Image: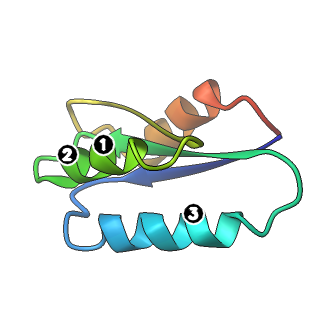
C-alpha cells in the first residue's frame, strides 16, 4: 500500500478542487493507496469541506488537531496514521 500525506492550513479556497484532483491522479497508481489529509489547526472552513469529501472517497482519511502546530508536526501526525509505505 502507498500512503500519501498532505497537511493543510486554511486552504478553504482550494481544498475541494485540490483534493478531487489528487484523488483522480492517484487512481492511476497500481495497487492499494490512501490519501491522508492533516488539518493543521485551520480556522476557516477547510476541515468542513474536506470532511464532506471523506464521505465520497473511501480511501481518503482526515486527521488533525485544533491548534496550528506547523508543517513538520502535521507531516509526522499523518505519517503516524499511514498504513502503507
Label 2 to label 1: alpha-carbon separation: 5 Å
In the image, residue 46 above or below residue 82: below
In the image, residue 39 above or below residue 25: above
Q: Which mark is residue 29?
A: none
Q: Is residue 17 left or right of residue 37?
A: left
Q: Is residue 14 left or right of residue 32?
A: left
Residue 20 location (% of width, % of height): 46, 68
* Residue at image location 11% in from the left, 53% down from the top: 44
* Residue at image location 43% in from the left, 49% down from the top: 56
Residue 42 location (% of width, % of height): 20, 47
Element under label 1?
A: helix
Residue at the spot of label 2: 48
Mark 2 touching mark 1, by CB under 8 A?
yes
Mark positioned earlier in the residue sequence (3 or 2): 3
Mark positioned earlier in the residue sequence (3 or 1): 3
Residue 29 location (% of width, % of height): 81, 63
Element under label 3?
A: helix
Residue at the spot of label 1: 51
Residue at the spot of label 3: 23
Tell me how many marks there are.
3
* Residue at image location 80% in from the left, 45% down from the top: 32
- Which residue is nearer to you in this view: 17 or 8? 17
* Residue at image location 21% in from the left, 58% down from the top: 10
Amino acid at each position: 500500500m502507498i500512503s500519501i500525506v498532505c497537511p493543510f492550513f486554511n486552504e478553504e479556497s482550494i481544498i475541494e478542487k485540490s483534493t478531487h484532483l489528487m484523488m483522480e491522479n492517484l487512481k492511476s497508481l497500481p495497487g492499494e493507496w490512501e490519501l491522508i489529509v492533516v488539518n493543521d489547526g485551520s480556522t476557516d472552513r477547510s476541515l468542513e469541506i474536506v470532511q464532506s469529501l471523506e464521505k465520497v472517497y473511501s480511501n481518503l482519511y482526515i486527521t488533525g488537531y485544533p491548534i496550528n502546530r506547523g508543517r513538520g508536526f502535521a507531516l509526522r501526525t499523518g505519517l503516524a496514521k499511514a498504513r502503507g509505505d
